[in-house]
């Protein structure tokens, strides 16, 4: 037997062992799958407590409509309970930074458990050092503990927050609250 034939025999033996191991693992995987296929709890989807794409788009549309009624140009941002951006809108004529400010306000709301901007602003006034290390926590969004944001709750669950910028703080608050109400959600548990 020459060297090439010897290598072919070794490869053939190795390939046979590998194929048997692969078949055995497929058999194990099939058995595991069969064991869980009868378990109905494995097929029930988990309840997601986050605003859907459709809800996010409606919330932004309601906010833009309310700003239009008031003849304002504003920016809005919606985040999920983890502070990740779900959607944003910058109306014609709104400041280029309005979305960043709105996102920072919404992020601050969910980062501190779903608090309103009014509460966040008061906490900041009471103890500014509480927020000294939060600037990098916003996934490249500013952390802005100020008015112009409210959390979005449904059935007692925090689904996210919406922030607004571009108008005086009291009007930012009013526009956001009207959008949340139009969605059929609440701004508090």
Image (cartoon, rainbow, N blue to C red):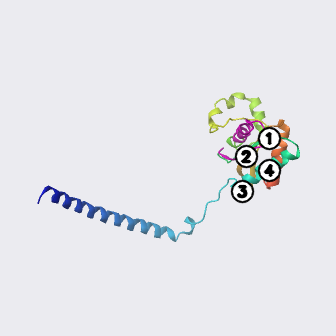
Taking the spot 64% from the left edge, 59% from the top edge, the residue there is 47
Q: Check residue 74 in the rendering and tell me which mark sits there, or answer none.
A: 1
Taking the spot 79% from the left edge, 54% from the top edge, the residue there is 183
**Foreground mark, 4 or 3?**
3
Sequence-earlier tag: 3 or 1: 3
Cβ–Cβ below 8 Å for labels 2 and 1?
A: no
Cβ–Cβ below 8 Å for labels 4 and 1?
A: no
Estimate the x, y position of residue 135 in percent, counting from the top left. Answer: 65, 32
Return the residue at label 3.
54
Return the residue at label 2.
161
> From this viewpoint, is residue 189 visible?
no
Q: Quadrant of residue 100?
A: top right
Instruction: Quote the CA–CA distance across marks 4 and 1.
Output: 16 Å
Determine if the magenta segment contains residue 104: yes
Sequence-earlier tag: 2 or 1: 1
Q: Check residue 180 in the rendering and tell me which mark sits there, or answer none.
A: 4
Cβ–Cβ below 8 Å for labels 4 and 2?
A: no
Q: Quadrant of residue 98?
A: top right
């Amino acid at each position: 037997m020459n060297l090439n034939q010897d290598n072919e025999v070794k490869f053939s033996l190795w390939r046979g062992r590998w194929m048997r191991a692969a078949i055995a693992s497929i058999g194990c995987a099939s058995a595991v799958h069969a064991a869980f296929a009868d378990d109905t709890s494995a097929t029930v989807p988990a309840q997601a407590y986050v605003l859907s794409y459709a809800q996010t788009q409606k919330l932004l549309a309601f906010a833009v409509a309310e700003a239009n009624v008031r003849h304002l140009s504003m920016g809005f941002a919606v985040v999920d309970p983890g502070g990740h951006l779900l959607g944003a809108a910058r109306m014609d004529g709104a400041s280029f930074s309005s979305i960043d400010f709105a996102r920072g306000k919404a992020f601050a709301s969910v980062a501190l458990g779903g608090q309103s901007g009014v509460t966040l602003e008061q906490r900041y006034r009471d103890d500014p050092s509480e927020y000294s290390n939060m600037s990098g926590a916003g996934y490249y969004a500013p952390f802005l503990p100020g008015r112009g944001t409210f959390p979005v709750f449904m059935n007692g669950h925090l689904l996210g927050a919406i922030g607004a910028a571009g108008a005086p703080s009291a009007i930012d608050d009013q526009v956001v609250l009207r959008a949340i109400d139009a969605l059929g959600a609440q701004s508090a548990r």
